[in-house]
Image: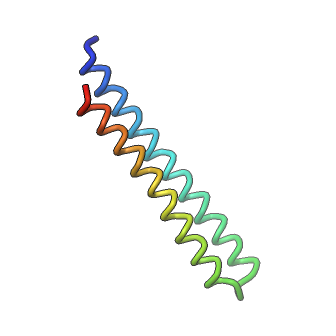
Amino acid sequence: MTNLALSFLSAGIGAGLSVLGVGVGIGRLAASALDATGRQPAATNDIRTTMLIAAALIEGVGLLGLVVAILLVTKS
């Protein structure tokens, strides 16, 4: 296998794992937020704000993973 083929393979695996991790993270975040809202409806606004901030951080990490995967392909 050539270096280019390995870089494409590693970029594909890295992008897939990154997207998979983001999906699992946001799913768990939403489930926890819905559970917390069900337990204490008065704190809905605080829970929503915290959830949106955490979701943005998770998306940022996922975007970083995709950028690294793209860099793996372009640098080889």
Rendered position, 60 above or below 7: below
**Which residue is the extreme one toward the front?**
75
Q: Is residue 66 above or below residue 45?
A: above
Picture coordinates of residue 75 (x, y %)? 26, 30
Q: Residue furthest bottom?
A: 42
Q: Is residue 49 left or right of residue 72?
A: right
Q: Residue at x 53, y 71 (%)?
A: 52
Residue at (64% x, 83% y) in the render: 44
Q: What is the x, y in percent for residue 72? A: 32, 32
Q: Is residue 15 above or below residue 76?
A: below
Colouring: rainbow
User: What residue lies at 48% left-to-right and 64% top-to-bottom?
Assistant: 56
Depth check: give the residue in front, 42 or 72.
72
Residue 49 left/right relative to 12: right
> In which quadrant of the rendered view does residue 2 lie?
top left
Q: Position of residue 14 (x, y in %)?
A: 41, 35
Residue ID at (37%, 27%) = 10
Q: From the image, which quarter does the C terminus lie in?
A: top left
In the drawing, does residue 64 fall left or right of residue 57?
left
Q: Is residue 25 above or below residue 66?
A: below
Residue 15 at x, y = what percent? 38, 40
Q: Is residue 68 left or right of residue 49?
A: left
View extreme (top): residue: 1
The N terminus appears in which quarter of the rendering?
top left
User: How many numbered markers are drawn?
Assistant: 0
